Amino acid sequence: MLERIKETASFLKNKMHTAPETAIILGTGLGSLVGEITGKYEISYEEIPDFPVSTVEGHSGKLIFGKLGNKDIMAMQGRFHYYEGYSMKEVTFPVRVMKELGIRTLFVSNASGGMNPDFQIGDLMIITDHINQFPEHPLRGKNLYGDRFPDMSEAYSKELIAKAKKIAREKGIKLQEGVYVGVQGPTFETPSEYKLFRIMGGDAVGMSTVPEVIVANHCKINVFGISVITDLGVEGKIVEVSHQDVQKAANAAQPLMTDIMRELINRA
Ligand code: HPA
């Protein structure tokens, strides 16, 4: 595994003409940030040795290198979800490669169902912490590097959270904050499951991010995460939900999410 990570990283290093310390996983709600990357060069996942290939609708798969504002960045357009059938090792492989490439800060976005009764569809939520409900742990098995029992006391950088809140205040953007519960999917939750996750301490629930954030913490990459609330798992407000509904709500929130991320990445 370590060898594969190094192989993939050295393949990419040969193709890279920058040395970014910032990576972005362009999850739901951040697709349009791609249009703001300048001096772009792209490598599709199929070309990269040992990289999984993404399948789900609305996610195409490539790495994009370039500049966002004044920062050299590397972006993943299309991530690997556990529900697609990838193992946790595959889901988190790109993060391990990022570490090998010298990445120090990772920005992630996703879509989620809001369980906090104060939330509305279209709200943006800074992820302050998570609860891992995936059935397999990405660090299970031989410890490749770093701590066998990694600390998770500040999985999401407090410094970046404070900066994001400051930016939102300056721009007059409403930001929620809360705990993201990561589940395997692919079903959305039953009303009783939303209720359970709320009682557990969750504000929103979704099917991604947690594996990548665990691995980023293991390799000492700072993390900032933001989620767009695309549907509500709040008693009395639960209605039928589809992938199209999620995409629609995420697209509507996209300009604000892009605005905050762009600014935060520049100031980070
Ligand atoms: N549950 C799980 N994942 C999600 C949801 C949800 O309600 N909305 C968007 N992704």
Image (cartoon, rainbow, N blue to C red):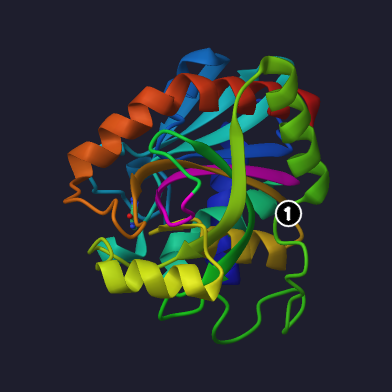
195 and 245: which one is in front?
195
Q: Residues within 10 Å of mark 1 (few under 14, many from 20)?
A: many
* SS state under label 1: loop
Q: In this view, does 219 lie above or below 105?
A: below
Q: In x, y percent, where is residue 226?
A: 56, 42
**Hey, which quadrant is residue 169 in on the image?**
top right
The residue drawn where x is 79% and y is 25% is 267
The residue drawn where x is 54% and y is 34% is 75
Q: Number of numbered discs present? A: 1
Type of amino acid at the residue the image marks with label 1: Ile
Ligand 1 under 8 Å from disc 1 Cβ: no
Q: In x, y percent, where is residue 178?
A: 60, 53
12 horizontally vs 71: left or right: left
User: Which secondary structure dominates the residues rendered in magenta?
Assistant: strand
> In this figure, which residue is indicated by the disc labeled 1?
221
63 horizontally vs 24: left or right: left
Q: In x, y percent, where is residue 200?
A: 52, 75
User: Is residue 116 one of those drawn in magenta?
Assistant: yes
Q: In x, y percent, where is residue 190?
A: 24, 68
Q: In this view, does 95 lie above or below 61?
A: below
Is residue 57 at least partly visible in the picture?
Answer: no
Q: Given the current orientation, which residue lies at the most extreme front position?
A: 236
User: Is residue 136 one of those drawn in magenta?
Assistant: no
Q: Is residue 255 above or below residue 101?
A: above
The residue drawn where x is 46% and y is 52% is 117
Residues rendered magenta in the picture: 104-117
